Image (cartoon, grey):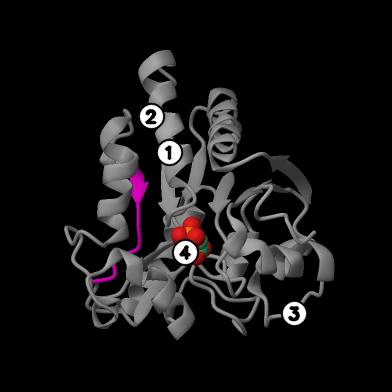
Amino acid sequence: MKIIQVEDYHDLSIKAAQHIITKIQNEPDLVLGLATGSTPKGAYKQMINDFQKNNTSYRYVKTVNLDEYVGLAKNDINSYFTFMNEHLFNHIDIPYSQTHIPNGMAKDLQTECNNYDKLIHSLGGIDLQLLGIGHNGHIGFNEPYTSFKTRTHIVKLTSSTRYANERFFQHINEVPKYAITMGIQTILESKQILLLISGKDKRKAVHKLLVEQNMSEEFPASSLYDHPHVTIIADKAALSLT
Ligand code: PGA
């Protein structure tokens, strides 16, 4: 794992955007795995700035998102569909038809999961997958004790994850209880992975990941140890226990 230490969230966002933009410039038809949550927002903003200033084009890029809540309509303000449109897709030149997010409203969720893996396969796999990490070490919505062999599947969110995401909703009761997520195996099949970690509230997770280095399904991010091309960009606050 390559670790890039940066000063703060602003620097992390610039570095992450540069990493992604360079990749797109070298491979204009890249398959880019995207993430939601607070952490990648700054990087998306920098990508939009770059698009406006330097015209880096996303015309041939294809995207696949990590996850989506079950039971939220696409146009719900808290769906990841809305998040991605607002924070990235509406502001760059990617055709919407080339952006993919699991459908959490699908009638048959299991078929939706199977089809999502088939879709990724049909695109030729993910060239670069962007990840965040949860306080409990989750990646995507793969919560502790998820098998490292999982493909896209339905998960019951832990109460710690639901409380962590409560800030986006009016009330904890509104936070969905289930989600569709790429599985750990699906993520690990990405050719390259870029993990972004910011802030002191992630420092314990970072300590587990970088200092304890114990590979265990109890800590999903430890599945990344065996991946040959993981880059971690972390700020000083996140690294403060290392
Ligand atoms: P965050 O979430 O970026 O909102 O901290 C990361 C995650 O839970 O994977």
Type of the residue with mark 4: Asp
Is the residue marked by circle 2 packed among few (<14), some (14-19), or many (20+) residues within 10 Å? Answer: many
Is the residue marked by circle 1 packed among few (<14), some (14-19), or many (20+) residues within 10 Å? Answer: many
Q: CA distance from mark 3 to mark 2?
A: 37 Å
Secondary element under disc 4, as helix, strand or loop, is helix
Q: Earlier in the sequence, mark 1 or mark 4?
A: 1
Q: Is residue 220 above or below residue 235?
A: below
Q: CA distance from mark 2 to mark 4?
A: 28 Å
Of circles 2 and 4, which is in front?
Answer: 2
Type of the residue with mark 3: Ser
Q: Quadrant of residue 14?
A: top right
Q: Residue placed at 39% from the left, 72% from the top?
A: 180
Secondary element under disc 3, as helix, strand or loop, is loop
Which numbered dot is residue 117? 4
Which numbered dot is residue 114? none
158 vs 24, nearest the viewer = 158
**Image side of residue 8 versus residue 56, left or right:** right
* Image position, residue 201 (x, y; %): 58, 64
**Magenta run includes residue 102:** yes
Q: CA distance from mark 4 to mark 3?
A: 24 Å
Q: Which residue is mark 2?
A: 48
95 vs 165, nearest the viewer = 165
Q: Which residue is mark 3?
A: 216
Is the residue marked by circle 4 packed among few (<14), some (14-19), or many (20+) residues within 10 Å? Answer: some
Question: Do the residues bearing badges 2 and 1 touch, measured as CB atoms within 8 Å?
Answer: yes
* Image position, residue 3 (x, y; %): 76, 46
